[in-house]
Image (cartoon, grey):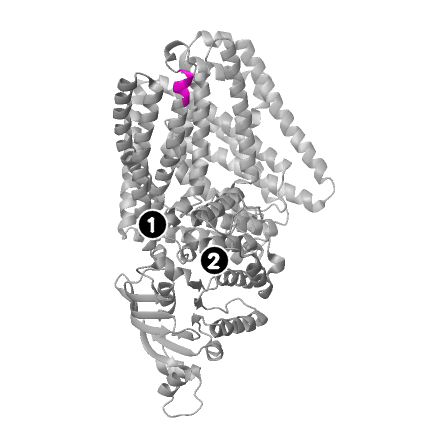
Amino acid sequence: MIGALLYLRLTSLRNLVVYRVRRLRQPKYLFGAAVAVAYIYFFFLRRLSYSTGAQAAAPAMADVGRVVAAFICTAAAGAALVRVAFAWIAPSEKPGLRFSEAEIAFLFPAPMTRRALIHFRLLSAQAAILLTSALIVFFFRRMGDTGGGRVATWIGWWVILSTFDLHVTGTNLTLARLRDRGRGFVLWRVLAVAAIVSYAAAVVLCAAAYLNAHSAGFLAGSGPGAMGRMLDGLASSSPLRWLILPFGVVFAPYFARSPADFALAIVPALAVVALHYLWVARTEVRIEEGSMALAERRAAARTAMQRGEAPASAGARPKPLPGPFPLEPAGLPEIALLWKNLLSMRNSLLNRRTVALSVWFLVCGLMVARTVLAQNARGGDIYGPIVVMLCFIVAGYTLLVGPQIARQDLRGDLPNMDILKTYPVEGWRLALGELLAPTAILTAVLWACIVVCAFAFDSRGDLEWLTPAVRAAGVLCLGAAAPFLCLLQLIVPNMMMVLMPGWYQATRSRGGGIELMGQRLILGAGQLLLALLVAVPATIVAALVLVSAYWWFGAAAPALLVALLAVLSILASELVVALWWLGERIAGFDVSADSR
Amino acid sequence: MIEVEALTKRYGAFTAVSALSFCVRPGEVLGLVGPNGAGKTSTLRCMAGVIPMSSGEVRIAGASLDADPVAAKRALAFFPDEPRLFEYLTVRQHLAFVARIYGVGPYEDLARRLLEELELADKADVLPGELSRGMKQKLVIACGLLHSPKVMFFDEPLTGLDPLGIRRMKDSIIRRASEGASIVLSSHLLHLLEEVCTHVLILKKGVKVADGTLEEVAARFSNGEAGVGLEEVFIRATGGTEA
């Protein structure tokens, strides 16, 4: 049986490779592959060969690598704990294992035992884990280099990822078995969650106590060496060393510095993997229904992603919601498209993950705001510049990456394009209406950044010129320009979709090989280049008008407002041309081209 | 009225529809038939403005689809074979959206009547994901009929409908035609065409093989035999092979 499963895996892999190599005969894939290879060479391989020579001359790099590795492993252990705790707190209705829909269709009715199915799932996971471990070593070795060889690091990551995968699988199977039994399901869950929370609390308290007692001594030193010694001391302190022993055993091969260290570490680590394997393999439980539901959710997520929607929303069944505002039967058709897309956006955004993230960011934001206000009240402004910098980062991210995330526009409506094209609406109006919803969302984020920046700047010290009037004028200028910028930025990917639907559709699939990675890089670079082309005329005019107006008025606030008018007229002109052009392309868009 | 002159659609080097000309007057129902790959769907999609023609001219209710697409599209409704709906809009919200797009004005009474006629009234507040395929098809029909189009294009209109739905769909097409609509429908179900269509156009490899009233086309391919059905006519006209 395992032979048949191996045949399926290996044959699929061979065919996939052959298919992808053959696909390179098409110029778009060949070009994408060339760009991706160049990117990997210049950003990873060249640095890797360079760093190999440099590392011998810089032993301090090993300390840096170990510190980074320690942080990575701490974060990984924390994430694993949270993941397992979440599985116990909110187990899915029908826990299952990860199979594709085709695997379910062929394997579930086949004369196979449940245990064989579980082994098939484990084998599939192993293929992915081996590849992931190799990629981690290949791409990120320098970042978290612990001083061991490449093979040792690879095996170290394989142990970590395999243990995690087996543990999560075992937890899901155990939960399924407990649910099947019925009795004591809630009690077991309460006990498990209590144990995990107590364990995490004990680790955090012990670490905090150690750091409070020893930080002064370590802070006297500096650099990664001191940090490394502090982490070593922390990890070997009692009782923390006993508490983190399970994680320590699993992480030990990764941290081994020499072949002898590795040989000592790998035996207990493999024993942990073997115990986890026995746990999973010996847990008899019904997995069929849960696995089918999981496969359906994953297929829906993949379809949603190809449609341009958030994959997170695909698993949940959408709920009917009232419109974002009353839609009158007469009026501009653009508003109807805005109404439709806002409705779609709300349904995409109103899921548990988004709400939890929003609450998390809100809490963090409130804590930062409270700290900033407290600092300002005490006369210092430590956090103000940090908040301003964060706002700049968020604003830049919103402008450059936001259009790739907010897709409730023509890209999201590509499957409905044949219906949209029968509407009695001019192309440019269709384009404008489709773009309004993501524009509104991105503009709201930018406005929030602008307002927060305006309040976070402390006008004392070097920024005395930042009077309330200048501040208000600045907020007005940036706020007025924001929707224009967002709209222009959104036009770019929509233009690409209309111009190159086949190319665009191909990049909507997850993974997809090196050639699709190259295509995504090309699309990203195109977006950046066009954004610069759009911004250059407006920026030059803004600078010239601002200087002239400042010279004329002798005050910043009115100069800013005059510059705003000039910038808005440039942006509006660009927008009119871009919308007209996009509209013309939509009118001539061949829907059938997306399948070619 | 639908006027089509020398409609040609090419996909790269492949010609899907070649210099197709015909006219459908108010009250007429034209059945578009042909083997798989004959160019029926391409023809329908070109006439509905979904895909651009490579060359030719299509006039919908007097408006050129090329020169004045907005006026032409205001008069037509296209019903694709696969119901395409907006996932997050309920049945009622679909109708509100379409009413606004087509500038229908007060639409609530008409929408209610359509929903009752199509047996969707009790589903007014559910999302398409909760509808069966047949119900989705009915919702597409309700949306298409909301602006009282003078021209209608149906691509395989009976797919997914139950027997009662099929009966109602046939009656609806005949009634709309009797009220003055020009209708083109594409289907492989020849008995549907015999029951509903006044005219038929047979396509093969993108080229018109025959057109006219059912009797005219039957007479052309009957070779003097009496009582030759459309199925036999179709097989003789297309040579019994696929496109």
Q: Quadrant of residue A238?
A: top right
> What amino acid does circle 1 point to?
Gly
Read off the magenta span: A467-472
| Residue A471 is a magenta residue | yes
Front residue of B234 and B179: B179
Q: Is residue A434 left or right of residue A352?
A: left
| Residue B152 is a magenta residue | no
Q: Is residue A170 left or right of residue A2?
A: right
Measure the alpha-carbon separation of dots 1 and 2.
22 Å
- Rendering coords of residue A538 (x, y %): 28, 31
Q: Is residue A413 left or right of residue A563?
A: right
- Dots 1 and 2 on the same chain: no
Judging by the rendered image, the residue that carries numbered circle 1 is A583
Q: Is residue A12 left or right of residue A97?
A: left
In the displayed structure, A243 sits above or below A295; it is: above
- Rendering coords of residue A305 (x, y %): 45, 46
In the rendering, which numbered label is found on residue B84? Answer: 2
Q: Residues within 10 Å of mark 1 (few under 14, many from 20)?
A: many
Dot 2 falls on which chain? B
- Rendering coords of residue A592 (x, y %): 36, 58
Q: Quadrant of residue B73?
A: bottom left
Q: Residue at x 42, y 29 (%)?
A: A394
